[in-house]
Amino acid sequence: MSAGRVSEGAGCITWWGFSPARNLLSFGPEKSEGEINVLLVGSGDPRHILKTIADSSAKQKLHIWVMEQSMEVVARQLLLLYITLIPKETMGINEKTEVFLELFGNAEIRSQTEETLRQAASQLILSVTETVEDAMHACLNTTFLKFKERDELARIFKLWIQQISSSGSSPVVMSKAWDYRVRQHLGTRYDSRKGCFDWDLKMKLHEKGCGVISTKQYMQWREKGLAFEMREGVYQRTNPTLVSTRVFNHKGDKVGFQGYWGDIVSSPYLSFGIETDDESLLRTQNRQHVKTAQDISCSNMQGLFQSLSSRGRCLTTAHSDAEKTPKLNLMQLSGVSVTFLPLDSLQKLPLKQKYCHYFNTIYFSANCVHQLGPMMRQIAAPDAVLVVELAKYILDLNKRQEAGFVEKVASLALEAGFEPWREHAADDVYAVFVPQKK
């Protein structure tokens, strides 16, 4: 039924992952004492960061290193972490959940959310343009990025503010940009798109165990890009954080077009909305789920925010003693730091002595697995765990292609010096490896 090209459904930029949030420290043998270093390659969103921090002991020292494929994704990650770290005295957990999910998965947002975005973007501009060596916040550390990358981040944040300030006349009308993508993906089947949407939901997502994604919500997201509608309000302002530039060949020249170039098939429900520890949210009645993926997303985010809030402390008058530079007025998470690395870091890390056998856990997303090579063994700690996202929820792949992807991942891991972790229970969402024994 889905007659589109594989690349068109998933898009060319990863705004959210194609798998549920997991505590990455739960994979592999139990971790030793001391600081744990986790490297994320192309995760696309902060789901694993939040879940890993929330589930780890408050005594655990955790340093998370993030590497993405584009600065637009880095900007989104910084924004979502910023929202997460707003103290509950400033923004209650329920409101924070609504704002987070709205910015995370909606092509269009409310004007109230725009104002929060404007304030966050203004603060993030300051955090990435400061020239001091110390990060303005341990969980928003961009000091390792190149100057041109930090300049690009500032440009993106300013662009968000400009689009918000343009009195509703955004250069990108999201409803048109979304419809363009749907037309490109479905081609001649566009006029029967509701049937295509229903097929993807019932015969793919539901068959893969995502029955909590309701027909009404999934159809609305496929049609309009509106995944989370949690209260009455007008969702008609373009979400500028989901706007990016894609380069096309036009009459021999390369031309950049702004629009929505992310996933239009699998849905943002996958990150936080299909798994939960609360069994009551998975209850069925007459073979229908009582709760929806939106309900589960809200519950999971509230739980994560509550856990992080209990671990965090707010520094309201923090200043750098050396530079007297004002810090961001956000929660500090005890023992936790998140550092963003340059886009081209993967090939360079093995060349630096600091990162020799450094990372205890390494995560690769499905769209970055081609970068998995022998150099990974040089930066992996002796007891390291390699976690690779599989292609289960990339819906435009058929079963044969999905199986081929699993084989390719196993082959790449073997060439890189890793072997399957034998104690890992059968899982078609993530593959888990450990260094080969010599």
Image (spheres, grey):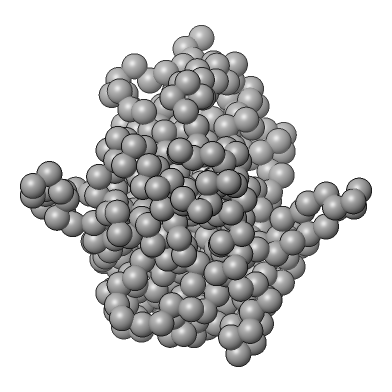
Q: Residue at x 70, y 64 (%)?
A: 258
Point out residue 304 in the picture as x, y percentages from the top left corner: 29, 60
Q: Residue at x 27, y 74 (%)?
A: 94
Q: Residue furthest bottom?
A: 167
Q: Residue at x 45, y 32 (%)?
A: 390
Point out residue 154 in the picture as x, y percentages from the top left corner: 69, 72
Q: Is residue 362 left or right of residue 294?
A: right
Q: Is residue 344 left or right of residue 189?
A: right
Question: In the rendered view, would you say 368 is above or below 301?
Answer: above
Point out residue 200 in the picture as x, y percentages from the top left corner: 40, 42
Q: Is residue 386 left or right of residue 7?
A: left
Q: Is residue 288 visible?
A: yes
Q: Is residue 327 visible?
A: no
Q: Quadrant of the N terminus?
A: top left
In the image, 207 versus 320, the foreground residue is 207
Q: Quadrant of residue 95?
A: bottom left
Point out residue 226 in the picture as x, y percentages from the top left corner: 42, 65
Q: Residue furthest top?
A: 438
Report how many numbered discs are placed on residues in the image. 0
Q: Residue at x 36, y 82 (%)?
A: 233
In the image, 337 versus 176, the foreground residue is 176
Q: Residue furthest right?
A: 252
